[in-house]
């Protein structure tokens, strides 16, 4: 398993919002403008990639071109970093519609995460590849996603694997679960496939520390945790990035 970029420091991605909203924290960005501002501050703090869940004016996640395009335009105008989105079921509950939705996009993200445990993952990945969009495979612990990915003819075409440690493990338990996931993935990964490892909530910081020790790409942001390593609420995505890069994790 490798970190992207030979000889380069492992990538730190900022995950701006996920499915969280103002009810979770006032710091969660929602509109294209607030996402762009949050992304710019996080990149200035040291993040090298941006992951975003485009949101409708009512707050729902969406992959509609009318929702996606303004978000991509705003974030790209604010940062020089690659912008990633996801095709998970929170954004489009009907997996059968996703390939059609992807073909309707007039503004394209740099990379799209496909959750291999969800129905229709291969069809979604194929539609992305047809449009020349990079694909990363999201593989969750304790699901059939890793096994399905290992059997997929599209596996060699994926640019990166995102390994997600299970919730709600915390501390040493989260690290152990993440190590178990990596061991499960390794036999089925095409040689040289980069891996981004992350946890969520109580596992976010322990798994980030593990990713750093292993030289793997990692991510942090309000999608994964609302708290700084000392347990205080984060005031922004940039504050989380600063804590990760300052070794305060």
Image (cartoon, rainbow, N blue to C red):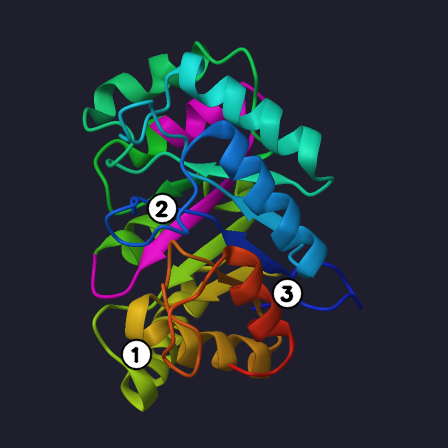
Find disc 2 in the rendering and name its residue: 18
User: Is residue 128 in the magenta section?
Assistant: yes
Neighbours of disc 1 within 10 Å: few (<14), some (14-19), many (20+): many
**Residue contact at pointers 2 and 1, CB within 8 angstroms:** no
Nearer to us in this view, 121 or 102: 102
Distance from label 1 to label 3 (Cα)?
A: 20 Å
Q: Is residue 72 above or below residue 64?
A: below
Q: Is residue 197 above or below residue 106?
A: below
- Image coordinates for residue 160, horizontal then vertical, percent: 54, 51
SS category of the residue bearing label 1 = helix
Horizontally, residue 17 falls left or right of residue 133, namely: left
Neighbours of disc 2 within 10 Å: few (<14), some (14-19), many (20+): many
Horizontally, residue 241 falls left or right of residue 225, namely: right
- Image coordinates for residue 45, horizontal then vertical, percent: 68, 60
Which disc is residue 220 wearing? none
Nearer to us in this view, 42 or 111: 42
- Image coordinates for residue 66, horizontal then vertical, percent: 43, 12
Q: Does residue 193 appear in the picture of this structure?
A: no
Query: What residue do we see at 48% from left, 26% from top?
Result: 128
Query: What residue do we see at 21% from left, 35% from top?
Result: 119
Q: Does residue 115 appear in the picture of this structure?
A: yes
Quadrant placement of the N terminus: bottom right
Neighbours of disc 3 within 10 Å: few (<14), some (14-19), many (20+): many
SS category of the residue bearing label 3 = loop
Which disc is residue 177 wearing? 1
What range is drawn magenta here?
A: 124-143
User: Is residue 191 in the magenta section?
Assistant: no
Question: N-terminal of the two: label 2 or label 3?
Answer: 3
Distance from label 2 to label 3 (Cα)?
A: 23 Å
Find disc 3 in the rendering and name its residue: 3
Query: What residue do we see at 26% from left, 27% from top?
Result: 92
């Amino acid at each position: 398993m490798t970190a992207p970029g030979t000889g380069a420091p492992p990538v730190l991605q900022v995950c701006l919002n996920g499915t969280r909203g103002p009810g979770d924290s006032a710091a969660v960005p929602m509109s294209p403008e607030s996402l762009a501002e949050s992304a710019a501050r996080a990149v200035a703090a040291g993040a090298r990639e941006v992951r975003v869940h485009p949101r409708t004016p009512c707050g729902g996640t969406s992959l509609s071109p009318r929702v996606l395009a303004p978000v991509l335009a705003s974030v790209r105008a604010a940062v020089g970093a690659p912008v990633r989105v996801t095709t998970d079921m929170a954004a489009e509950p009907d997996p059968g519609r996703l390939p059609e939705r992807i073909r309707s996009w007039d503004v394209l993200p740099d990379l799209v995460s496909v959750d291999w445990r969800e129905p229709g993952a291969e069809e979604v990945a194929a539609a992305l590849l047809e449009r020349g969009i990079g694909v990363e495979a999201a593989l969750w612990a304790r699901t059939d996603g890793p096994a399905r990915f290992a059997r997929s003819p599209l596996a060699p075409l994926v640019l990166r694997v995102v390994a997600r440690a299970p919730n709600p493990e915390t501390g040493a338990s989260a690290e152990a679960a993440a190590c178990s996931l990596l061991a499960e993935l390794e036999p089925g990964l095409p040689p040289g496939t980069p891996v981004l490892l992350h946890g969520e909530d109580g596992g976010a910081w322990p798994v980030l520390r593990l990713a750093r020790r292993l030289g793997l790409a990692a991510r942090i942001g309000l999608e994964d945790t609302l708290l700084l390593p000392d347990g205080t609420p984060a005031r922004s995505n940039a504050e989380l990035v600063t804590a990760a890069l300052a070794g305060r994790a």
